[in-house]
Every structure is written in structure tokens, then in C-alpha cells.
Amino acid sequence: MAALTRWLELLWDRPARIVSASFVTVALVGTALLMIPAATTAPGALRFLDALFTATSAVCVTGLIVVDTATAFTTFGQGVILLLIQIGGLGIMAFTVSTVYLVRRRLTMDEAELLSFMLNERNRHVVARQLRDVILLTFAIEAVGAVVLTAAFVARGTAVGTAVWYGVFHAVSAFCNAGFALFSDSLEQFVSAPVINVSVMLLIVAGGIGFGTLILFRRDPVPQVADAADEPLTYQPRIVSGGRMAGVGRRLGMPQALAARVAVTGTVVLIILGAVLYYLLEARHALLGMSLPRKYLAALFQSVTLRTAGFDTVAFSDVRRATLLVTLPFMFIGGASGGTAGGIKIGSAAVLVAEVRRFLLRQRDAVVFHRRLAGRLITQAVVLSMAGVAAVFVATTMLSITETAPLETIVFEVVSALGTVGLSTGLTGTLSDTGRVVVVLLMFVGRLGPLTLFAALRPEGKTANVRVPEGELPVG
């Protein structure tokens, strides 16, 4: 009993450990639920490893599958997957603590600190106010998406009851960037359905752009109160100017406004660039035979789904090798921090670009939108990116040993799993048991993020603050 108490104390002392343990726990509970005979259409046919893979993919909002969601699971099983997606998309602790908050209308200091860790908000005093907005906005956006998608499915001849289930499931799956679909071909049969395409794309972007950005324009300003653990919040009028963004800066403080501006700009740039590249590479290949508007729509959808969403309207098994390689950076970057998307995040990519620009132009500081970046941000972005590259290299090497697929297919699968994208060229369903374990671990690492895992695994005790003499090494 004493050992258990000590373990719980160590767990609670580190928000990262609680987050990690929570994801593992929910994935295991989901695995057990999916193995119930009522969850599958062929009772007893789902192996433990396949159930674990499915549950992990759902709670990590990835979308990779080893069994067909549409045919292998009953409505109950699909409902379990939907619940795992919703919990994983909101963030397990945000989901749990929000329930406590809604019941008793207050948070303890420990709960606020833990939630701030999940919502990517440094000021704990802002967290409780953001929590309500995040929960309400999430359900409101999903509800609107579900209504629109339901109407679209009914218009295509689907029975009302089935259309409602399709609408709810795909709205939640799209907003949470999960990529699970109730159709065996994902959304390929709807490649020429503009309402379904646009609705899913908007839900994907809304979920991937970050909760902080979604609540930017709320009416009630949040008091900017700093405590000992927070950095002072300052307002620099020249950083953003004019219109609503200036008001955003006054209401939220510049750290939040800057993050939102980077998230929006980065999302728009990546989507447009991805769509252009996909169209140029596939206009005479995978998109051949489509009308010009249909080609544009398909290229745009494929680019949006690279924001770690996992749906597709054109099979990635049909695209060129060059297209697979070009999509890797987009999947690796992913969406914005504090949202439902995976990847190293747009903010990290922006920091790296700013640092490269500083080096090339011999500037003193790395700058983003006229804002000087702190050294710790550059260090975190570099460590995160290096950890991601290392994970891709190790996993690719392991799958190259266990699987017989071409290298580009394996790399695509690995980056898709690590970025919690969920796109596949068809390799997932043919993975060996060892390969499935590797991908499960990748999805787990990708959803939590290397920095979270580093924080959870960091040994107890203070690091010695010793400064050694400076040295020089030849570089380049």
C-alpha cells in the first residue's frame, strides 16, 4: 500500500506523467471494450493486438486501422471508438477536469496546473476561463458539422437514422483530426460531393488550428494575472496592428495573439502550398479523368487532410512516389499547438524557420512577426524536431526489418503514425505483429509529443547548475 501511495505521489508531482498514464489507461480500457463480443460483427474474431491498435489509434486521434471500422464493428463498437476519439481529441485530462469543473464550478491549484499543461496555456489563471469556452466551442462546432453532414447524407439517399449516425461520427472524427470513417474507402466515394468535402475540411481546420485560436474573439476579456510560475505578460502595440487582431492583443496579451497569428498564417500557407504541389504532381496521374473543379477540390482536400486528419478522397496508394515524399514534411509539421492535430506543430516549424533566417541574415535575434523569440523556444523546437527525426529513423529501420514493403511506403507509414495523421498506402492492414507494436508506440509518442515524454521520464532531483569553461568545435 505504501508503495502504491508513493507511486501515486510521484505521478501527481509531474503533469506529464499523469497525461502519459491517462492515455495508456484509456487505451487499455478501450481495448477491453472493443474485445467485448457485442462490439464486433464477428464475436471473438478481434485479437487483443488488433483491439489495442484500434483503441490506441482512436485515443491518439490517428486513424490508422488494421480492421475495417465500417464492417468489423457493430454500432456499439463504433460508439466506443467515437468516445475514444472525443476523449483523445479534447485531451484526456481536459475532458476529466472539465467534468469536475462543470460539477463544482472551481478548480484546485493542482487541477489548474495540470490543465494548463494540456491546453498549452502558461497562465493558470486563464485556464478555468478557457476551459468552458473550449468545451462549449468543441461541442457546438461538432454539432453544426453533424447537422450539415447529416443533411448531405440524407440528400444522397441515406436513411435518416443512418445519416444522423454518419453525420455525428464523421463530424467528431473530423474535428478531432482522427480520420476514422464509417466507409471502407474512407471518403473516396464522396470525391465529387462539395458539401461533404467542404464541411469535413472546415472541421479539420477548426480542430487543428488550436483551441486558443478558436476562442480568440470571445467577448469577455480574460484578466491578465501573473503568478510566480508565469512569465510577465506585456503588450506591444506594434506587433499586430489594426482591426480585430489589435483587440485580440489587448484582450489576450501578446503571447496568445502571436501564437494565434502564427497558427492561422502557418495553416493557410501549408494548405495552399500542399494543394498546389499535390495538383501539379497528380493532375495527370491520380486526378486524371476528373473535371478541373473536381481536381481542385480533391487537391485541396488532400492538402487539408495532411493537417493530421487522416481522411482521403483519393487513395494514397494511387499517387506517385514523388507525391508521397512531398507530403512527408506536411505530415511531420502537423497542426497548431493546443488543438487536436499532431506533428511537431506549426509553432515549432515557425521557430526553426526564424532561427535559420537569423543565421542566414546574421541577425542578433530570431524574430517572428516582429517579436523576438526566447532562447528556450529555439531549444525546445530543435529538440522536438530532432526527437521526431530520430523516431522516424528508428521506426523506419525496424519496419524495414519486419516488413517487405518498399522504403518510401514504410517511411510514409511511419511519419503518418508519428504525426497522428492516419493516412496509409495500404501497408497498415498487412503489418506483422511486431510492426503493429512499433506503430502503436509511434502513435502514442506522436500524440503525447517527445517533450511530454521527456518531462515524464526525467529523473527526480534538481539539475546541478554548474557552468563549465567555454569550448570551440569545428562545425560544417
Image (spheres, helix red, strand yellow):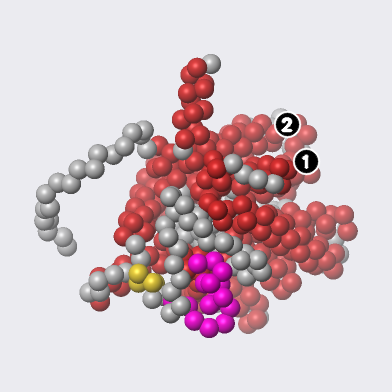
SS under mark 2 = loop
Report whether 32 appears left or right of 120: right
Q: Residue at image x 70%, y 68%?
A: 199
Residue 130 percent coordinates (x, y): 61, 57
Magenta residues?
239-253
Q: Is residue 248 magenta?
A: yes
Report whether 293 appears left or right of 331: right
Q: Residue at image x 70%, y 34%?
A: 33
Q: Is residue 94 magenta?
A: no
Q: In front here: 4 or 397? A: 4
Q: Residue at image x 45%, y 45%?
A: 452
Q: Amino acid at mark 1?
A: Phe
Residue 464's tag is: none
Q: Quadrant of residue 306?
A: bottom right
> Can you say which quadrant of the picture contains the C terminus?
bottom left
Residue marked by disc 1 = 76
Q: In front here: 238 or 137? A: 238
Residue 65 percent coordinates (x, y): 61, 47
Label total for image: 2
Q: Earlier in the sequence, mark 2 or mark 1?
A: 2
Contact check, label 2 and label 1, Cβ < 8 Å: yes
- For the question of whether residue 442 can be seen, the reply is no
